[in-house]
Image: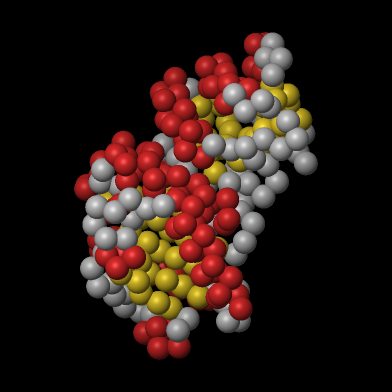
């Protein structure tokens, strides 16, 4: 599995469930020397972190103050803010930044969902190369399974099952894990549009070591995305099944290569 960094989507059934998971996640971050933030609507409070809150190793942040209800986030600005916060944590002597955030109020409208999904990939690219980690919570009861699938597909790890994940990579344009078939085709097209992985020197390289299966339509979609950007699609470290399918289909715009 190509999970190179800790950025996880957590679909939850109750606020109490998310707070319990967030507490565990943040305590682990503190044990690793990271500064930790808990971000949630209203006046967030998280018991069990009292000492860290007193020293500044932990912070609680109201989502209502940073992103008011109905707001559409600026994906790049939001990712940049967390990058700056991570660098500030490092400068203060911490080993990085870890955040647990309930983003549910920011995906209740279509425009919000599109922007938040773009942000998830933008910050994930940063997390692939810098000491930032996050647990992004979404209340399944409020937003539904389809919305959860759309945001979960932009994370390297999740407790939901979107079928595949498209996420950042330190050594490639992006990484893919899971399975791609007819049931995920529409979601794949959306994820590619939102993430928009870019080619380098004429090649759009995807780390696919965690991709267990891909059908011909999905490979074609990936090749089209690369071709539309004037690039050759490179599948790095694919499974034997994916390699054979590329060969059988005779996809001239797709190249297979071993691990870097």
- Its colouring scheme is secondary structure
**Pick the front one: 38 or 258:** 38
Q: Image point 64% across, 57% down: which residue?
A: 129
Image-based side of 168 in relation to 82, left or right: right
Q: Is residue 245 above or below residue 125?
A: above
Q: Image point 61% across, 54% down: which residue?
A: 128
User: Can residue 213 be seen at all in this image of the molecule?
Assistant: yes
User: Can residue 226 be seen at all in this image of the molecule?
Assistant: no
Q: Is residue 21 above or below residue 159?
A: below
Quadrant for residue 233, please give it.
Answer: top right
Q: Is residue 66 above or below residue 125?
A: below
In this rendering, the count of numbered labels is 0
Image-based side of 211 in relation to 14, left or right: right
Q: Quadrant of the N terminus?
A: top right
Could you say where residue 151 lies in the image, as x and y percent from the top left?
Answer: 40, 44
Q: Is residue 242 above or below residue 15?
A: above
Q: Quadrant of the C terminus?
A: top right
Could you say where residue 157 lies in the image, as x and y percent from the top left?
Answer: 49, 48
Could you say where residue 178 lies in the image, as x and y percent from the top left?
Answer: 52, 35
Quadrant for residue 237, please give it.
Answer: top right
Q: Image point 33% across, 55% down: which residue?
A: 103
Could you say where residue 198 lies in the image, as x and y percent from the top left?
Answer: 62, 37
């Amino acid at each position: 599995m190509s999970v190179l960094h800790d950025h996880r989507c957590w679909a939850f059934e109750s606020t109490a469930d998310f707070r319990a998971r967030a507490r565990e996640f943040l305590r682990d971050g503190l044990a690793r020397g990271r500064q930790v933030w808990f971000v949630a609507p209203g006046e967030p409070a998280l018991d069990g972190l009292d000492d860290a809150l007193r020293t500044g190793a932990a912070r609680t942040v109201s989502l209502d103050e940073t992103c008011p209800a109905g707001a559409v986030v600026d994906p790049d600005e939001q990712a940049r803010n967390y990058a700056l916060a991570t660098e500030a944590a490092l400068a203060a002597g911490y080993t990085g930044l870890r955040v647990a955030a309930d983003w549910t109020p920011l995906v209740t409208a279509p425009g919000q969902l599109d922007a938040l999904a773009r942000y998830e990939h933008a910050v994930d690219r940063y997390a692939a190369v810098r000491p930032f980690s996050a647990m992004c919570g979404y209340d399944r009861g409020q937003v539904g399974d389809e919305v959860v699938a759309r945001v979960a597909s932009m994370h390297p790890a999740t407790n939901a099952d979107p079928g595949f994940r498209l996420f950042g990579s330190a050594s490639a344009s992006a990484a893919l894990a899971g399975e791609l078939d007819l049931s995920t085709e529409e979601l794949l097209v959306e994820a590619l549009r939102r993430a928009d992985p870019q080619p380098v020197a004429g090649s759009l390289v995807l780390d696919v070591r965690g991709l267990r299966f891909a059908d011909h339509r999905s490979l074609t979609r990936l090749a089209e995305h690369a071709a539309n950007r004037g690039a050759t699609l490179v599948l790095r470290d694919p499974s034997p099944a994916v390699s054979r399918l590329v060969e059988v289909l005779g996809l001239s715009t797709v190249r297979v290569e071993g691990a870097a």
